[in-house]
Amino acid sequence: MKQLYLTATSDIAESLRARWFSVYSVVFGGIVVILFAFGLSESRVMGFTGLSRLLITYIQLSMALLPIFVLITTVRSVAGDREAGIFEYMLSLPVSLAAWFWGRFVGRFIVVFLPVFLAMLGALVWGVIKGSEIPWTLFVYYTGLLMALVWCFLGIGMLISTLARSSDVAQAAAFIVWLTLLLFLDLILLGILIQENLPPESAVAIALANPLQVFRTATMMLFDPQLVLLGPTAYIILDNFSQSGYIFYAVCYPVLFGSVCAGLGYLHFKRSDLP
């Protein structure tokens, strides 16, 4: 555990000095500032007012930006170290492969999640100062969803990073994975499968295997409990999940998905020719 802790703190310190972290923090902090500047915290839409609407808008923007940020920065973690020849130096130190790999994973999770969480927390603090009603349930729920989303794509990124032999290949693979998941949002490609007489239940099952679709549907469920925006698909989802059951699934499934990907990445990392 001491080796894992030291590796995690080392990765955090390295990330805090990196230019990408500064850009990353400015982007998500700037989103909240812009939303306040445009008066979203003062407006009312579909019964949502103040911070509730701001958080809903913020998490929708996070869904578009967060995965690609996590993937692009993470895939360079192992592939970049391999290219830089760091493995030879690492193997000369009394640090196990498991401590190094999972230490990097935990450290990167903290670094990636912290700016996103602090931006939401800053919005709540500002709301308290302005005397707005604080949507604590929404805040806790969205915090859990964002943690799950970061964990999921961090695991995918670590898997890609261990499989790719260079950082350029890793970045290209990360972009392809992200684009593929985007194409399956709202059953874009699954519509073709339904036209080929695929049962609707099977199409929805394929869609709900996509972490991005799970995340997006879960964010919709709080302001649209009946999922009217999804049309007939909502009946299949709500018949197989209750509202609370789907929320539980939306938090647990991405965490499990990311953990499995990270685990597979570690197994390949452990058995591969590191140099």
Image (cartoon, rainbow, N blue to C red):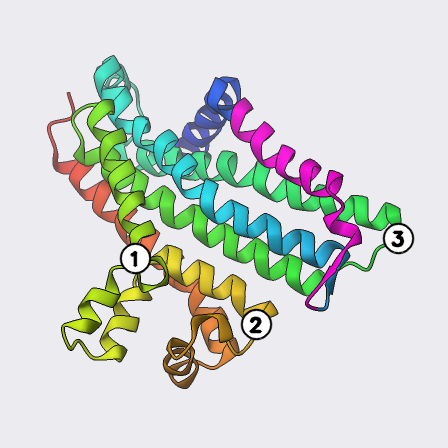
Element type at mark 1: loop
What is the span of residues highlighted in magenta in the rendered image? 22-46
Q: Name the front one of labels 3 and 1.
A: 1
Disc 2: which residue: 224
Q: Label 1 sits on what residue type?
A: Phe
Asked if the magenta segment contains residue 24, the reply would be: yes
Q: Position of residue 146 (x, y in %)?
A: 51, 51
Which residue does the image show at 14% across and 72% down from the upper left? 196
Q: Is residue 153 above or below residue 275?
A: below
Disc 3: which residue: 131
Q: Main secondary structure of the magenta part?
A: helix
Element type at mark 2: loop
Q: Position of residue 85 (x, y in %)?
A: 23, 14
Q: Is residue 47 above or below residue 28?
A: below
Picture quarter containing residue 200? bottom left
Q: Is residue 151 above or below residue 48?
A: above
Residue at the outermost bottom position = 239
Which residue does the image show at 35% across and 32% down from the upper left? 72
Disc 1: which residue: 184
Q: Name the front one of labels 2 and 3.
A: 2
> Relative to the observer, which residue lies in front, 204 or 193?
193
Picture quarter containing residue 48? bottom right
Q: Is residue 255 above or below residue 76?
A: below
- Circle 3 crowding by C-alpha within 10 Å: few under 14, some 14–19, many from 20: few
- Circle 2 crowding by C-alpha within 10 Å: few under 14, some 14–19, many from 20: some
Image quarter of the C terminus = top left
